[in-house]
Amino acid sequence: MADMFKLKVITPDRNFYEGEVSMVEMTGTEGDMGIYKNHVPMTVILAPGILKIHEESGVRKAALHSGFVEILPEKVTILAEAVEWPDEIDKKRAEEAKIRAERRLSDKTGGIDIARAEVALKRALTRLEVAK
């Protein structure tokens, strides 16, 4: 059995997850990261991506839509804007959001917020990846 540590995932409207895990993987603004017990303490800004929670029974995946993570040697706390389990994702809505974001990014007339459209596209793609 791997060394376990406490993981807590909190959103503004609920305690999404709380339990003992052997590893957690997520996407920070600087890239993907994996955390094990006894990691060096740090705080990281999270970007939209797949949250992978490694439990004794297997790996659970969720769509994480940005936030912050506090990493301590014995505990990791994620404060997320939103997190969704696969069965909570509306695939049709995610596909429509993907199409809208792609349309905005391909619009050459200007006047759009490219960074915002890129984040919207990343969120939609993450939802679709987790939901399949």
Image (cartoon, rainbow, N blue to C red):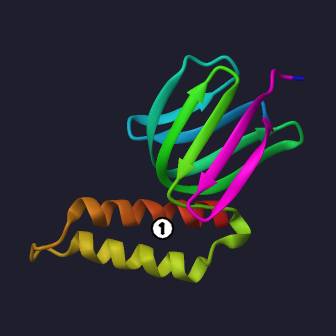
- 109 or 13, which is in the foreground? 13
- 28 or 121, which is in the foreground? 28
Three-letter amino acid code at the position of disc 1: Ala
Please report the residue visible at 49 percent of the width from the left and 25 percent of the height from the top. 42
**Left or right of residue 66: residue 12:** right
Snapshot quadrant of residue 11? bottom right
On screen, 40 above or below 21?
above
Image spot of residue 74 (x, y percent)? 70, 23
Q: Which residues are magenta?
A: 2-20
Image spot of residue 33 (x, y percent)? 53, 32
**Residue picked out by circle 1:** 124
**Left or right of residue 108: residue 70:** right
On screen, 108 above or below 5?
below
Image spot of residue 114 (x, y percent)? 22, 63
Please report the residue visible at 29 percent of the width from the left and 63 percent of the height from the top. 116
Please report the residue visible at 61 percent of the width from the left and 24 percent of the height from the top. 72
Query: Label 1: few (<14), some or many (≥20) within 10 Å?
Result: many
Asked whether 54 falls inside the magenta stretch, the response is no
On screen, 25 above or below 109?
above
Q: Quadrant of the N terminus?
A: top right
- 9 or 95, which is in the foreground? 9
Image spot of residue 132 (x, y percent)? 67, 66
Please report the residue visible at 9 percent of the width from the left and 77 percent of the height from the top. 109
Asked whether 5 falls inside the magenta stretch, the response is yes
On screen, 10 above or below 85?
above
Q: Secondary structure at mark 1?
A: helix
